[in-house]
């Protein structure tokens, strides 16, 4: 059985679910079985850049991934994981969905409501 060391990169205690149990990751280093440790590494992320597909991991695996300290904590519950500020949705005009086309009328990046119409072909 391989053991990995999870390094909490934040200043707060973290937790994740693995195999039906809650796994705690206090500030500092915590040993875990490799499967559980890598699962926690993949689950404890703050955000995902949709352009580069780079994610900000809140924990690191000692000697395998980045373990440098972070000045951020877990994302708030009302914050989306995908960082849409990196997306330029103003270029999207229409998208083919199934047999019809969905027309997006002004999908600006300012957070306004986009007009959406659909037509069946």
Image (cartoon, helix red, strand yellow):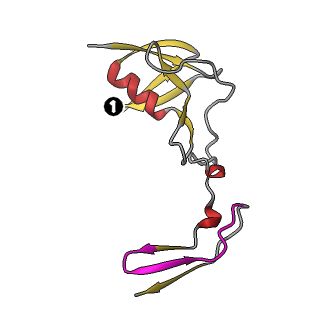
> Quarter holding the N terminus?
top left
Q: Tell whether 68 sits left or right of 17.
A: right
As displayed, is residue 77 above or below residue 61?
A: below
Is 88 or 72 nearer to us in this picture?
88
Q: Position of residue 89 (x, y in %)?
A: 61, 62
Residue beneath label 1, please? Answer: 19
Q: Position of residue 90 (x, y in %)?
A: 65, 65
As displayed, is residue 97 above or below residue 32?
A: below
- Residue at 47% x, 86% y is 119
Q: Tell whether 12 sits left or right of 38.
A: right
Locate residue 100: give its quadrant: bottom left
As displayed, is residue 24 above or below residue 44?
A: above
Locate residue 72: give its quadrant: top right
Q: Which residues are magenta?
A: 96-109
As displayed, is residue 58 above or below residue 75?
A: above
Is 90 or 23 nearer to us in this picture?
90
Dot 1: within a 10 Å radius of its alpha carbon, few (fewer than 14), some, or many (20 or more) residues? Answer: few
């Amino acid at each position: 059985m391989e053991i990995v060391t999870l390094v909490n990169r934040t200043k707060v205690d973290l937790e994740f679910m693995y195999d039906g149990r809650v796994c705690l990751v206090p500030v500092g280093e915590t040993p875990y079985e490799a499967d559980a440790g890598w699962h926690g590494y993949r689950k404890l992320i703050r955000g995902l850049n949709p352009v580069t597909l780079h994610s900000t991991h809140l924990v690191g695996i000692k000697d395998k991934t980045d373990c440098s300290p972070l000045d951020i904590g877990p994302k708030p519950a009302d914050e989306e994981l995908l960082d849409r500020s990196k997306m330029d949705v103003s270029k999207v005009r229409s998208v083919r969905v199934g047999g019809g086309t969905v027309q997006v009328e002004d999908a600006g990046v300012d957070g306004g409501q986009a007009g959406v119409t659909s037509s069946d072909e």
